Amino acid sequence: MTFYRGSELESVYQNALSDGFGLVASNIAEPNVLIGLMEGASRAESDLLLQASAGACRFAGNGDAEAGLNALGAYIDALAEGFDIGVFLNMDHQTDTEFIEFQMDEEIPSSVMIDASSESFEENVKISREVVRMATEKDADVLIEAELGQIKGAEDDLEVDNAFYTDPEQAVEFVDRTGCDLLAISVGTQHGVAKGKDLELRPDLAGEIRQTLRDHGLDTPLVLHGSSGVQPDQLRTMLRHGICKVNKDTRYQYEYTRTAMEYYERHRNSIVPPDADRDGRDTFFNETAWTPNKDHFDPRVGGRQIRERIAEVHAQLAAVSGSAGRSRYLETQ
Ligand code: G3H
Ligand code: ZN
């Protein structure tokens, strides 16, 4: 349907807060994941929140983040037309205010996350507030997410060795002084490969942060980063404690590669010649009896398998997070 911006996304979060569900914010860097996510969200009748990091934009733009964002934005916009759900784009873990300004001027994202969580509290407040002001001054239709606390692990170019759990009173001061629309908190999740059973999750702390904010008149949706290893029951508990945006990246990266690997392993003999004929590659097998089979090496064939698996995984996640069957677009039909 439509590639929506901040004001529509805000109304989805309001529904999420009142009805106790969450949006799975799903990272993209290339078309097969993007199309798989659209397909999965559409099957689940869920709105779709995509995410792109600066690294993903640079990848899409062959090193040029601005070109990559423009290309991704145009691609999302064109493809969203084919699906009867609302599609949104969050700019994930942004650290460069010049690039954020570009995003707002191009009017592409629905929301922007400024990540100054590695800075001191005061510096984090200052940088995050500047981004909120930038959006206000430009009258940009974007929500601003900021982060307080530190989440262990590696995401894009950012690496954190030790977790710092978010303090509820500091969260109130942070939201109050920055004016951010969403708050990313650290409650024991980890960026990257992490097993839910090993995580020291603190849903109680998420609940306390939510309640302390509410006690001060702040109805700020909370964001859970590093959620790939978080298990369905753990996720449901988090959702009951004020989380309404759940970030997943690593899970899709794994599904992408494993799906491709299994497919190519199954069809190895159609793609790789027997050992003795390996040299034939440079002549495209002109001198050998063996011939590769295009039915299996055409990248679109493996690509379709990847799209289907990403669609399945995302539809399952939308069911767990409770966004399935609640598309804002479908509700207005
Ligand atoms: O911002 C993106 C996420 O927090 C993704 O975390 O890679 O652990 O799924 P993940
Ligand atoms: Zn993250």
Image (cartoon, rainbow, N blue to C red):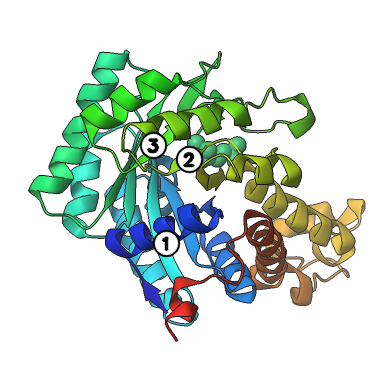
Q: Are marks 2 and 3 in contact (CB under 8 Å)?
A: no
- Tell me the kind of residue under disc 3: Arg
Q: Residue furthest left?
A: 137
Q: Residues within 10 Å of mark 1 (few under 14, many from 20)?
A: many
Residue for badge 3: 214
Q: Can you say which quadrant of the picture contains the N terminus?
A: bottom left
Q: Secondary structure at mark 3?
A: helix
| Rendered image quadrant of residue 222 | top left
- Tell me the kind of residue under disc 1: Val
- Spot occupied by residue 226 in the image (x, y as percentages of width and height): 58, 35
* Residue displayed at 37% across by 44% down: 63
Q: Mark 2 or mark 1: name the one nearer the start of the chain.
A: 1
Residue for badge 1: 12
- Spot occupied by residue 11 in the image (x, y as percentages of width and height): 36, 62
Comparing marks 2 and 3, which lies closer to the viewer? 3
Q: Secondary structure at mark 1?
A: helix
Q: Between residues 110 and 186, which one lies in front from this camera angle? A: 186
Whether disc 2's CB lies below 8 Å from ligand 2 is answered no
Q: Can you say which quadrant of the picture contains the C terminus?
A: bottom left
Comparing marks 1 and 3, which lies closer to the viewer? 3
Q: Mark 1 or mark 3: name the one nearer the start of the chain.
A: 1
| Rendered image quadrant of residue 280 | bottom right
- Spot occupied by residue 112 in the image (x, y as percentages of width and height): 32, 46
Between the C-alphas of marks 2 and 3, the distance is: 16 Å
Q: Are marks 2 and 1 in contact (CB under 8 Å)?
A: no
Residue for badge 2: 223
Whether residue 64 is visible to the viewer of this picture, yes or no, is no
* Residue displayed at 46% across by 29% down: 209
